[in-house]
Image (cartoon, rainbow, N blue to C red):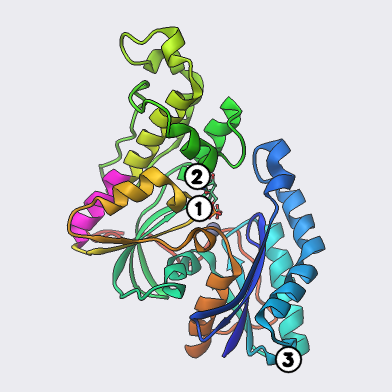
Amino acid sequence: MLILGIETSCDECSIAVVRDGKEILSNVIATQIEEHIPYYGVVPEIASRLHTEWIIDVYTEALQKAGIQQHDLDAIAVTSEPGLVGSLLVGVCFAKGLAAALDIPLIGVNHILAHLYAPTLEMDVVYPFLGILVSGGHSVICKVAGYNDVEVLGTTIDDAIGEAFDKVAKFYNFGYPGGPAIDKLAQAGDDRMFHFPIASLHKGNHTYDVSYSGLKTAVINQLDFFRRDGATQEEADKPEHIAASFQRIAVETMMRKVRKAVEDTGLSTIVAGGGVAANSRFRSELLAIPNTTALFPSLKLCTDNGAMIAGIGYHYLQDGLVADATLQPSARIRAFQKKFINGGT
Ligand code: KG4
Ligand code: ZN
């Protein structure tokens, strides 16, 4: 079965053709990064306009690269939640029109589930596993028992981890997007030059939750205060030290909760996804957790892409989870509640 997957939830305009939820025939990704560089972040209005301008070309290229005609398609899957609502709307409207014109099923896909499905396109992934989704919009730790069976254990109570990378990079002029720029700079830095604070959320229902706004503010506002004892201004005043010290704490914040979740759930497979899963420190620390196997999709499937939408769309279709012309995009995810393995909700 050939499924078309459309992804326009943020700044990637991507369309893919995937056979039977597994075999990627094409995965065209047109990134808008260049267009958002002057603003050090995604400007929603620009993003949705560009999706509108680009989507036909991306679609045409996806069919060409897959070597198929549009009448060969069996269904259209599209990210319908969560994301920037204007951007989502472009993909959803396009998908609706296409599904109606070709008279084939329309499938509205949850972007978070799709990220967690992405590694399945490249390797054999056995459920259940501990899913870690770290991106510009999300920091989620969850138990994944099936493509559509996810129990969220923890999430961020404020900023997402990728957002913290992007904001710190914006302040220091490290470049955009901030994650790769900081990752690169940090290679040459002393990660203990600055002792930035680590948020400690362990009470009540926050066992697996993270917080990044305090770290972000500390890095931006109070550098002198956090400098390592005895370091001179000249020693400390190097961007690579700031990058390395920030990255150490940003990753450790997440890792503490991941280690706790591994301990409490007993799950031995960890699957990571989202843009920050490309981070070299994050990868090596996940790989170092004893008695576990950490799986990462390749870079192209870590960040937003149509293949993961088409891939998971196949399973939605098999299970009869199809949408109709009333499908609406949603900035947030409905019915995706956090549950706790230690009781309570
Ligand atoms: O998954 P993604 O492409 O888009 C969504 O946010 O859904 O993730 C983008 C995020 C950005 O915040 C970017 O700075 C971050 O992923 N990122 C990284 C790295 N590569 C991308 N963060 C840390 N280290 C990296 N190497
Ligand atoms: Zn994403």
In the picture shown, does residue 254 fall above or below 20? above
Magenta stretch prevailing secondary structure: helix
Q: Secondary structure at mark 1?
A: helix
Mark 1–mark 3 Cα distance, whole angstroms, equals 33 Å
Would you identify the image quadrant in which residue 95 lies? bottom right
- In the image, 31 versus 343, the foreground residue is 31
Whether 80 is drawn above or below 103: the answer is above
Give the residue at mark 3.
Answer: 71
Q: Amino acid at mark 2?
A: Gly
- For label 1, the residue is 275
Q: Position of residue 132 (x, y in %)?
A: 38, 57
Q: Where does label 2 land, which residue?
A: 162
First of labels 1, 3 by sequence position: 3
Residue at 66% in and 80% down: 66
| Residue 271 percent location from the top left of the image | 35, 62
Query: Going from the N terminus, do you reach mark 3 or mark 2 first?
Result: 3
> Of helix, strand and loop, which one carries label 3?
helix
